[in-house]
Image (cartoon, rainbow, N blue to C red):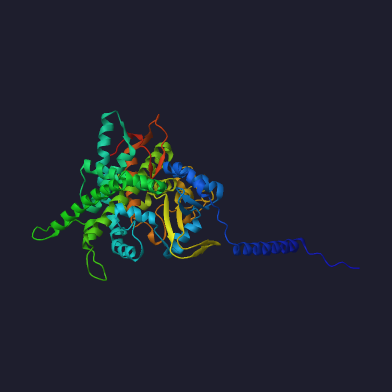
Amino acid sequence: MSQPPRPEPAAAETSAASAAATAAAEMSAAAAKRPFVLPRVPRWRSLLSSFALAQNPLPVLDAVLARHGDTVEVYIGGVEKSILTRDPGLIQHVLQKNHRNYAKSKFTMRFARYIGHGLLTNDGPDWLRQRRLIQPGFHRQRVAALTGLMQEITAETLAPLAARAAAEGGHTTVEVHEMMTRLTFRIIARSVFSTNFPEGELDRLAGLITELQSFFVRAIRQPYLKPWFRLRGKFRHADALAAELRALLGGLIDQRQQANNPPTATPPPDDLLQMLLDVRYEDTGEPMRRSRLIDESLIMLVAGHETSANALTWLTYLLARHPAPARAVQAEMAAVLAGRPPTFDDLPHLGGALHAVQETMRLYPPAWLVDRVALADDEFQGLPIPKGTLFSLYFQGLHHDAKYWEVPEEFRPARFAPGQPQPMQANAYVPFGGGPRLCIGMQFALTEMQLVTLELLRQFDVEWVPGQPEVLMQPLVTLRPKHDFRVRLRLRGGVSGF
């Protein structure tokens, strides 16, 4: 009896592969129909870890995700239920693909109590109206026009350090976070108000912002202490600090409006405050009211220096600990600029400094965690999202996830250079947020940080001062160092100021 012909090996392999693919597709389809099982950390366990969370949430959150996966339900301080995630797809869904369904949560609204309802804390149609009104102030052309101002203030800040280094044998030490806070505060103050704050006033403003942040995040992480805070007058004290901030900025706004009024009117400066004063709402033709002017200028002042100050502080730390990337930036400057100061048009050709900034903001994202709340029922890849679900979008965890970053704990600026073998997944890198609420000042901040890095490395070699304690992170509203640290600035030969 004749046997049926056996298939050729290639045909058999093709048939087997086809059957396997069909089975895999059926399994995938079946899995897609099954609801996503969300891991949960019990309330009692969250409550036990609340003290550690208040001190430093990063190790606590990292341990939770390492144990349970990229998305897990937790209780903030053992009280507030939240979905903690570092899943780039879910983060993109919330911030971009279905952003209309997700608003700032009550935690952000509580921060608005202290810094007002500006772009950072506002939401809904009112936010969109303000965003459209303010957006032209941060267009590329305006940022380009501010390049000279950024360079001037950077040179003014570094000149005393260069003089001190020359008097001390060619090098001097500096407290980094203090230096970068002063530098970035001067830049944003001049950009918004065309004024230099006195040193004492600058220190007071920075202190007010730090104290408000510290109290705000502690109230979130330990909500069970609110009765104690009220009893001790902590909320009243924070309100008084916020009132002091607003009074200071309100005085500057009043001075500008008086200077703009005849008969003493003079040509106003072309700064961001004047832009806020000049704009008119399309629907009414009316200007911003005074309280809104204070809100928006305060947000610009706080967010405009905080992000850059922290990122530049971490960048200086990384360059001091890893001198090879600093030398690469210096070599690129020598090749492109041949000793002259950079212009705005030179910046695309000086990618080394920008890549160092980008890599710093991956390792130390200033906005390390962002909150959102669902406005209506939703679903993401089998995960049901009921109305009112609170999300904690953990950018710090995403930026350190080995699934998307090769050797994620290493400082490798070249990973952002073109033509890398492992292309970057766009939604795995969110230092400025994402979607329509992408930080309005992103181009301003990147330009500022690139220019500061270039001038710092043009004048100095940055060296680590041995014998210092470990530099720890302090995650407040933004990610800053817990304590300041020192670097040695060693003069390089043949440099001159701008």
Image location of residue 449, percent across then percent down = 34, 48
- In the image, farthest residue toward the left: 263
Q: Is residue 177 visible?
A: yes
Residue 190 drawn above or below residue 93 = above
Would residue 405 be found to the left or right of residue 12 on screen?
left
In this view, 2 is above or below 48 = below
Whole-percent x and y of residue 292? 25, 59
Q: Quadrant of the C terminus?
A: top left
Quadrant in the picture for residue 465: top left
Viewer-nearest residue: 12 or 373 = 373
Return the residue found at the far bottom. Answer: 283
**Residue at 24% across / 53% down in the picture?**
192
Residue 259 pos. (x, y %): 13, 56
The residue at the point 9 percent across, 57 percent down is 264
Asked if one can make out residue 498 in the rendered structure from this viewpoint, the answer is no
Front-lying residue, 76 or 275: 76
